[in-house]
Amino acid sequence: MWFVATAVCILLVSINTVSLPLPANTTLHVLDPESVVRDLQRKVEVSRRRSLSSSAEACLTGNPIDDCWRCGSKWASDRQRLADCGIGFGREALGGKGGEIYVVTDSSDSNSENPKEGTLRYAVVQEDPLWITFAAPMSIHLSDELIVNSFKTIDGRGVEVRITRHGCITLQYVSNVIIHNVEIQNCVPSKKGDDVRSTPTHAGVRGKSDGDGISIYGSRKIWIDHCTLSSCADGLIDAIMGSTGITISNNYFYHHNDVMLLGHSDDYMPDKSMQITVAFNRFGPNLVQRMPRCRLGYIHIVNNDFTEWGKYAIGGSANPTIYSQGNRFVAPENPNAKEVTKRVDSGGKKEWEKWDWRSEGDVMVNGAVFISSGDKASGLIYEKTAERVEPKSVGLIDKLTMNSGVMGVGHKNGNGGLHEPSDDSVVVYGEGSLGMIFRGGRYTGYATSLTTHWTLHILCILVWVGSGLFEFKMY
């Protein structure tokens, strides 16, 4: 019996240390997606009115995300407030909220199977929630795709952080991830056959990656905010395989072909449950197509600034719902590329005219044309020239997108920069084991949660005691 008890304990601990993939989402993230749209509209209006108030703080812009966290003079000592500022379908993304602060002190990435403590890769694979910050400006040249575990925030505020080369960032069967204020560029496919760590207890052989900037695969509750992305081998942000509950906001995309793919394939039905918000981003210059390219799901594209695409801005196939609202579309000079929208493999007009593609309050400049469709569309062709648009509408888009991309001095988006206020908290860097890190002189952050950790130990003790009593009665 003692042998059996030992085997049971080993099994219990093994269950705790194995990271099981999340199933492909087959249920809607939100049953009424229009309620999320209305909530976003309400937050924009509230922030706009606050910014126009005579007593408004100078830092208020009308952008509900930035106005939620940025105006505080001590945001650096209350970084996790950011997790309360989400909007849209990814508003429930917690990231590392409630977890410890992990400070990246080492920009190297020489060992993707056994990463060094102090590196970004070491932090993102841990099991416990972590809020990951950076000790200094750094450029991280990835040796393989960076596989991020659930309940993580990568927070580059206060310093300039660039992630580049192989991969780059992969979110695969995870939830509750926030990526904020980092630059991602020049990503190329990773090498095939490398062992790459995904949790403290698991490293596996990976195939060749696509070379996306951020790849979201079978994941939910994801928020990508204030990043600058350019020049990757495949997409800048791709969300596929049943991913849902995603917000892509305040980012700056430039110099790229296939910008954003939302949906795996036309016949992959779990993507019907995909719900994604694309808000307050700047697209351009030197972008060609897929801003985004959608399949099957519900996509809310709101208050973005699109500048002179090469082929088209918004495309889709397999009957996605696309709600375009309050965006500015500046068409290129090419007379053959004035149309904002493109139906891909649509089966002809009789088929695609049933698709729900709506344009509401969009600003059309330089001959841009949005082809609407579906029962909710006000008309098949929605066209508006800059002369017919009220100036305050244009001004609102400028204010909402003025700080898009990485907030830092010298970045290509030309924003005013973000300086880290003084932080009274003390962070102590130290060595650890079992995924521990040090903060404020105490070590925390087990690779498995402490509650689960001790629960399993108690279960083991009970099994051993029970087996001993059984043997005692036998005699």
Image: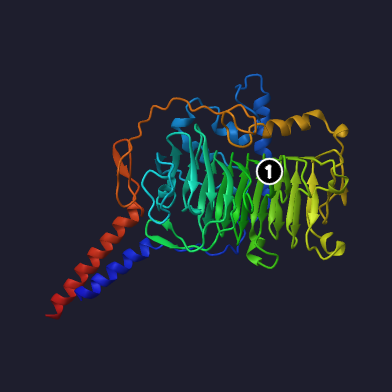
The answer to whether residue 95 is visible is no
Residue extending furthest toward the left: 475
Q: Which of 396 and 233 is in front in this view?
A: 233
Q: Can residue 346 be seen in this view?
A: yes
Helix, strand or loop status at disc 1: loop
What residue appears at the point 50 percent right and 25 percent down from the top-left corner?
73
Residue 288 position within the rendered picture, expressed as x and y whole percent measured from the top left: 74, 48
| Residue under the image location 37 percent in, 48 percent down | 116
Determine the residue located farthest toward the top in the rendered image: 54
Count of marks overlaid on the render: 1
* Residue 208 screen position, x and y as percent: 54, 61
Q: Which colour scheme is used?
A: rainbow
Decide which of 155, 382 is in the foreground and name it.
155
User: Residue 15: image x %, image y %?
Assistant: 37, 65
Quadrant in which residue 252 is drawn: top right
Quick one: quadrant of the C terminus? bottom left
Quadrant of the rendering where the N terminus is positioned: bottom left
Figure check: 88 above or below 401? below
Number of residues whose C-alpha sits closer than 10 Å to that of mark 1, classed few (under 14), some (14–19) or many (20 or more): some
Q: Position of residue 247 (x, y in %)?
A: 61, 47
Image check: 139 left or right of 272? left
On screen, residue 95 above or below 392: below
What kind of residue is marked 1?
Answer: His
Give me the residue at 78% from left, 32% from top. 393
Q: In the rendered image, which residue does mark 1 sit on?
A: 255
Front-lying residue, 429 or 4: 429
Q: Does residue 290 appear to the left or right of 1 in the view shown?
A: right
Tell me the quarter of the picture where residue 462 sits: bottom left
